[in-house]
Amino acid sequence: MIILLYADPQYSGYVIYQPAMHPWLSWIRWLNPLYYLVEANLANELDGLTFACAPPQLAPYGPAYEGAPQACAITGAARDTTLVTGSAYLDMALGFSKSHVWRNWGIVMGWWACYILLGCLAVESIPVAGASKGVLLYKRGAQPHIDGDQAEKISDSENTEQSVET
């Protein structure tokens, strides 16, 4: 059963098509930040628009029905008309509403803040590959390894200290 759900094309893409979802899996859409963005964008863009149905979406359709009363066979179309409003389509087909635009904006800002906080916590707590928080300890009485430049500086400083003492 689980394998069939993952292979089902209605559970892929930016937004899961809500009316076709199984009721016990409908909570998944609330975990997707893109769901809120797409709903806000579509509701904002399609609100107030009216679309005329093209011949393949008209019912009845065909040469024998020229001049006969036709209706639009698209979700959200009113009865006995060939026009569909954008807000009616969004409400009936996807369950989106223009009143959710600002709510969705707030939710997306909340998701953004959550991701920023999680990113900051991860940067602070997860060590970089190859890095360690170890402390360099020297064996008592042993000389640390000194390269040539540092050795010259040390010998110069010792010479100046000896000349000052004498």
Image: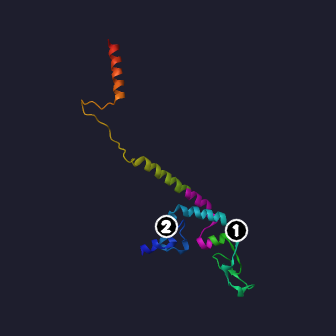
Q: Secondary structure at mark 2?
A: helix
Q: In this rendered view, identify the residue nearer to me: 137 or 84.
A: 137
Residue at numbered disc 2? 28
**Residue type, mark 1 in image:** Leu
Where's residue 136, x and y in %? 31, 37
Quarter of image, res 160: top left
Q: Are marks 1 and 2 in contact (CB under 8 Å)?
A: no
State the scheme by which the image is colored: rainbow
In the image, 17 versus 99, the foreground residue is 17
Three-letter code, disc 2? Ile
Q: Earlier in the sequence, mark 1 or mark 2?
A: 2
Work out which quarter of the rendered image holds the C terminus and state it: top left
Q: Residue at x 65, y 75 (%)?
A: 76
Residue at (61%, 62%) from the top-left corner?
Answer: 40
- Residue of label 1: 49
Image spot of residue 154 (x, y percent) = 34, 24
Q: Residue at x 34, y 14 (%)?
A: 163
Image height check: is 36 above or below 159? below
- Which quadrant holds the N terminus? bottom left
Q: Which residues are magenta?
A: 91-108
Q: Residue furthest top?
A: 166
Q: Is residue 32 left or right of residue 134?
A: right
Q: Is residue 69 left or right of residue 11?
A: right
Q: Nearer the viewer, residue 6 or 156?
A: 156
| Location of residue 35 in the rendering, given as x and y in whole percent from the top left corner | 55, 64
134 to 90, vertically: above or below:
above
Crowding at dot 1, Cα within 10 Å, few <14 / some 14-19 / many 20+, comes out as: few
Tell me the number on the disc at residue 106.
Answer: none
3D distance between C-alphas at marks 1 and 2: 30 Å
Q: Is residue 8 left or right of residue 55?
A: left
